[in-house]
Amino acid sequence: RSDGMGGAAALPITISNIRKNYGSFRALDNVSLDIRSGEFLTLLGPSGSGKTTLLMVLSGFVRPDSGSVRFAEREVVLLPPHKRDIGMVFQNYALFPHMTVAGNLAYPLKLRHVHRAEIEARVEKALDLVQLGGLGARGVDELSGGQRQRVALARAVIFEPRILLMDEPLSALDKNLREQMQLEVRRLHDRLGMTTVYVTHDQREALTMSDRIAVLDKGRIQQVDPPQALYERPKTHFVADFIGESFSLPVTVNDGGATLFDQALHLPRKIAGSEPYFLVLRPEKLTLLPNSVDGEAGVNVIKGQVRQSVFHGDSVMIYVAVRDAHEIALRIPLRGNVVLPQPGEHVRLGYGIEDTIVVPAAEQAGGE
Ligand code: ATP
C-alpha cells in the first residue's frame, strides 16, 4: 500500500455466539453476525440494547463471557485493542485538546514509529480527505464541533486500518451538520474501502448510511438486512415500529390468511401460525379511495373517520380513527390541487397487497 490512504484491504468480521452479562443483566444474548469485507454495517437499536457493548467487544475494550470474534481467519476475542489494527471514532472525539490538529493526527503514527517525512505526508493527505487541508497548525480547542469530529475521523483512518469502528460519532452535532457529515462519512468509507461498523440509535441515520443494518433489542439481533428490505419487509413488530413511521392494527390469522376486524385481508404470501399478528401500515403507502366504489381490485381497504390533519410542509398527515379504538395515518403529498379530507369525514383507505406487512404481535427470539 505504497500510495497511502486509499488502499487498505478490508477484512470480514465473524461474530459468533457472543454473550456478555453485567452481573445478572444480560447485555448481549448470544449474538451472531457476519459482516462482509468492505461493508458499511450499522448496529441500530434503542438505548440499552447492547450496541456499544457489541462494538466494544469488536474493539477489545470489553471481553465477552463467551463467544468468538474473527477478523478474517484470525480469532481476536482475547487480543487487546492495540493489537487489533482497528480505527475508532467516538461521540466525544477523544482528541488531545492541547495538541494541534496535526499533532493529534501524527500521534498514532509516532506510536507506530513511522518516519517523520511519511508522517507529514500522511497527515496532509488525511486532512485533505476530511476537508481540513491547511488547518494542521490549528489548536484543537480552536475548532468547531464538526471540525473536531473530522479530525477524529482523520486520526482513525490515518494508519489505514482494515476495520473502522464508530460509536455515535455524529450525535453531538446539530441536525444540518449531522446530515452533511453522514454523507461525508459514507464517502470516506467508500473511498478507503475498509469494513465499517457504525453504532447509532437514529434510524434515519442508519437508513442513510448503511449497506446493511443489524437491529438490536435487549441484547439480541432482531433482523439484519439492507435499509430498504428492513423498511419494506420487517420481520418483527419491534423492527416495523423502530424503523420509519408505522401504525399497527391487530389481525387474526387463520389457514394462512388473515382477518382485519370482520374483513378478509389479502396477503402477499401465506403466513404460518395462529398467534396474534399486527398489520403494519406505512403512512405514505396508504391512499384515499373514492367513497362511491365498493370493492377495489389489488388493494386492501380500511374504513375509518378522519380525526386530525397535520401540515408538514411538503405533505399532510391525516390521522384516521379505525373502530374508535385504533388510529392510523396516511401521508398525502401536497402537489397540484389535492382535496384533503376534513375532520369527521368517513374515508376508505387502500393499500397495495404487495405492501401489506403482517408481523407477529408477540416478541420473538431474534437471530439472523
Ligand atoms: P446507549 O445508546 O444508551 O449507549 P447501547 O445500546 O449502546 O445504549 P450499551 O451501552 O451496550 O447499550 O449497554 C447495554 C446495557 O448494558 C445497558 O442496560 C447498560 O446499562 C448495561 N451496561 C453497559 N455497560 C455496563 C457496565 N460496565 N456495567 C454494568 N452495566 C453495563
Image: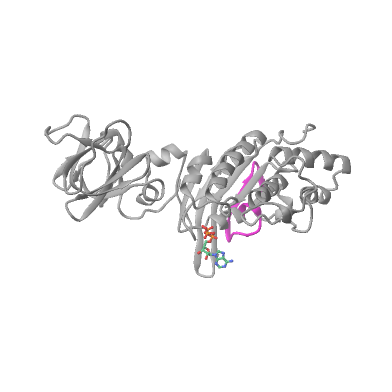
Of 279 and 350, the residue lying toward us: 350
Q: Is residue 86 left or right of residue 365?
A: right
Where in the figure is residue 306, as x and y percent of width and height?
20, 47
Q: Quadrant of residue 116?
A: top right
> Which colour scheme appears in the figure?
one colour
The quadrant of the rendering that contains the N terminus is: top right
Q: Is residue 367 left or right of residue 296?
A: right
Give the magenta part as a residue range: 57-76
Where in the figure is residue 241, as x and y percent of width and height?
37, 50
Of 146 and 38, the residue lying toward us: 146
Q: Write the residue at 31% across / 37% down.
A: 285
Of 42 and 301, the residue lying toward us: 301
Where in the figure is residue 315, as x and y percent of width and height?
34, 40
Give ligand 1's quarter of the image.
bottom right
How many discs appear?
Answer: 0
Residue 159 in sight from this viewpoint: yes
Q: Is the residue 60 above or below the residue 280 in the image? A: below
Residue 76 in sight from this viewpoint: no
Where in the figure is residue 215, as x and y percent of width and height?
46, 49
Q: Is residue 60 magenta?
A: yes
Q: Write the residue at 17% across / 31% down.
A: 296
Q: Is residue 313 left or right of residue 175?
A: left
Q: Is residue 257 magenta?
A: no
